[in-house]
Amino acid sequence: MNKRPTKAQTREELERKTQEFLNKGGTVKEVDSGATGLEDGAYHRNSFVFGHPKQERTPVPEALNAIDARRRSKTEKPTLPHSKRPRKKIIYDDFGEPVREIWVEE
């Protein structure tokens, strides 16, 4: 099982590869910060969606109406009243000690 390289190891490898590139005669072109993502001074919006142009959406009012109707039919159902079950209540004395338990219907 191979371990993932640490950040320090990754930095060292990138630095080593950069030095090899420069030693073989390669040059590094200076680019202004933030300029690489710009086209004519603005971000190219289509590049954020893998290069495809924005697709037009087709409205589907029939499907939306059917969904809304199902949602309304669920909320219009009458709710059944909950059966009220007795609940245990503890009676405490003046010092906060439990004295007895009683069953109360509310």
Image (cartoon, rainbow, N blue to C red):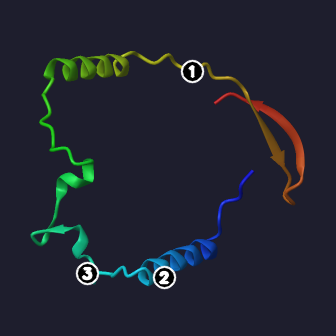
The secondary element bearing badge 1 is classed as: loop
Which image quarter: residue 16? bottom right
Q: Quadrant of residue 106?
A: top right
* Near-viewer residue (99 or 44): 44
Point out residue 8 in the picture as x, y percentages from the top left corner. 62, 76
In the picture as drawn, the residue positioned furthest to the front comes out as 24
Mark 3 lies on a secondary structure that is loop
* Above or below 96: residue 86: above
Residue 25, position in %: x, y? Answer: 38, 82
The residues bearing labels 3 and 1 have C-alpha atoms spaced at a distance of 71 Å
Q: Residue at x 68, y 27 (%)?
A: 105
Q: Is disc 1 surrounded by few (<14), some (14 to 19) or many (20+) residues within 10 Å? A: few
Q: Disc 1 marks which amino acid?
A: His
Decide which of tag 2 and tag 1 comes sooner along the chain.
2
Name the residue that disc number 3 marks. 31
The CA span between labels 2 and 1 is 77 Å
Give percent across and percent down for residue 88.
78, 34
- C-alpha gap between disc 3 and disc 2: 19 Å
Residue 19 image label: 2
Q: Is residue 91 above or below residue 63?
A: below
Residue that numbered label 1 is attached to: 82
Above-or-below relation of 37 to 85: below
Q: Crowding near pointer 3: few (<14 within 10 Å), some, many (20+)?
A: few
Q: Earlier in the sequence, mark 3 or mark 1?
A: 3
